[in-house]
Image (cartoon, rainbow, N blue to C red):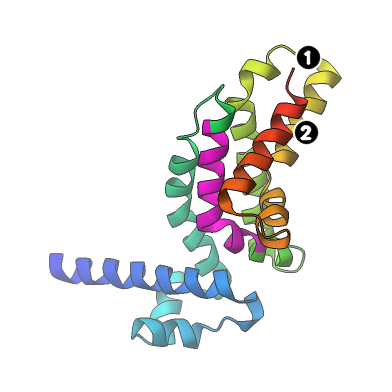
Amino acid sequence: MGARADAARETGERILAVGRQQFAEKAYDDVSLDEIAAGVGVTVQTVLRRFGSKEELVRAIVVAATPGVEAQRDQAPAGDVVGAVDTLVEHYEAMGDEVMNLLRQERRVPAFAEITAHGRASHARWVERVFEPWLGMRSGVDRQRLTAQLIAACDVYTWFLLRRQAALSRAQTTKAIVEMIEGVLP
């Protein structure tokens, strides 16, 4: 019984890994369960039996990835702008393109919209934690505005514009984000 359960768990993990790679690189409509199954060496029926549907597979991929993502981002030290931005850029270097792919499709893929909504809320909590020493000095609309500015400066779109569109190096992207943040901090 143990070996069979281990094999089923390993198969599920391989399906999640191949599925995540496919969804990270392609548009939702271009990802097929046939390709995922073939990449794992199982049948589509195995994928469906395990996850139910393509949309449920997406949700399972997110559930599996979320603890690692949050643990990595939680390494950002509160009150240390450079340290926080270093952690953030490291995260975006690993996952920024994947996140941008989800964001481009969130309006037409309900599962992606759920993921991006969760990501936005998580990002806002991260900003509140990391920048609390400065946010704590503000209240009301002043705090709200500073929070919004910090969310924007630290957003994956900002990383994308600097790193991918402007073709800045990783170090220059980090420096640019730090400078934007320092420009709004009291």
How many discs mark residues in the rendered view? 2
x 35%, y 72%: residue: 14
Amino acid identity at mark 2 = Ala
Is 50 placed left or right of 120 in the picture? left
**The quarter of the displayed image where residue 150 is located:** top right
Q: Residue 36 in the image: x percent, y percent? A: 45, 81
Q: Is residue 134 left or right of residue 71?
A: right
Q: Mark 1 points at which residue?
A: 139
Where residue 167 sits in the image (x, y, percent)? Answer: 67, 60
Identify residue type, mark 1. Answer: Ser
Give the left or right position of residue 26, taking residue 76 as reference: right
- Tell me: residue 133, above or below residue 23: above
Residue 44 is situated, as x and y percent measured from the top left of the image, at: 44, 85
Residue 159 in the magenta stretch? The answer is no
Residue 148: assigned label: 2
Q: Which of 53 and 130 is in front in this view?
A: 130
The answer to which of marks 1 and 2 sits earlier in the sequence is 1
Helix or strand or loop: what does disc 1 sit on? Answer: loop
Q: What stretch is highlighted in magenta?
A: 83-100
Q: Mark 2 falls on what kind of element? A: helix
In the rendered image, residue 92 lying in the magenta stretch gets the answer yes
Please state if 101 lies on the left or on the right of 72 as rendered. right
Residue at x 70%, y 53% (from the top left corner): 162
* Residue 52 visible in the current orientation: no
